[in-house]
Image: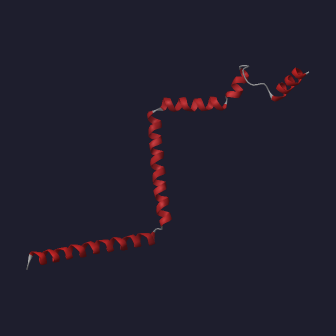
Amino acid sequence: MSDRRARMIEDRYLRDSAKALVEADLEHLKTGLSQRGLTERAFDKVREGAVDIYEEAVEVAEDNKGALAALIAAVVVWFARNPILSLLGLGEEPDDAAAERDEAEER
């Protein structure tokens, strides 16, 4: 047998093996999709990603407790700024008082 013929037979076996692998992969994919739909698979991936992000956030929070406490305190102060400023006498005047003052200035 010539080298060319032996090479052709070897290439044909490789081609047939590759084709069999592709067909087996397609069959496996079809079986998997029939058992669990594409939507369910996508939902599972999203859920796994969310769990990973949550675990990372918990780890970062545990490593940076002081920064987290400062951030929470800043948010609380921001939402409570108007009552705090009014207690210190630095807050805005109520709308009624401002309206009366404007009327008095116009006269």
Q: Nearest the camera: 27 or 106?
A: 106
Residue sitting at the far bottom = 1
Q: Residue 91's spot in the image, x, y percent?
A: 73, 23
Taking the spot 87% from the left edge, 20% from the top edge, the residue there is 105
57 horizontally vs 73: left or right: left
Numbered marks: total: 0
In the displayed structure, 17 sits above or below 44; it is below
Q: Residue 31's spot in the image, x, y percent?
A: 40, 73
Taking the spot 71% from the left edge, 19% from the top edge, the residue there is 88
> Quadrant of the image for the C terminus?
top right
Taking the spot 70% from the left edge, 23% from the top edge, the residue there is 85
Residue sitting at the far right = 107
In the displayed structure, 62 sits above or below 50; it is above
Residue sitting at the far left = 1
Q: Nearest the camera: 98 or 66?
A: 98
Q: Residue 52's spot in the image, x, y percent?
A: 44, 48
Q: Residue 38's spot in the image, x, y percent?
A: 47, 66
16 horizontally vs 92: left or right: left
Give the image quarter of residue 89.
Answer: top right
> Quadrant of the image for the N terminus?
bottom left
In the displayed structure, 45 sits above or below 70; it is below
Give the image quarter of residue 8.
Answer: bottom left
In the displayed structure, 59 sits above or below 27; it is above
63 horizontally vs 95: left or right: left
84 horizontally vs 49: left or right: right
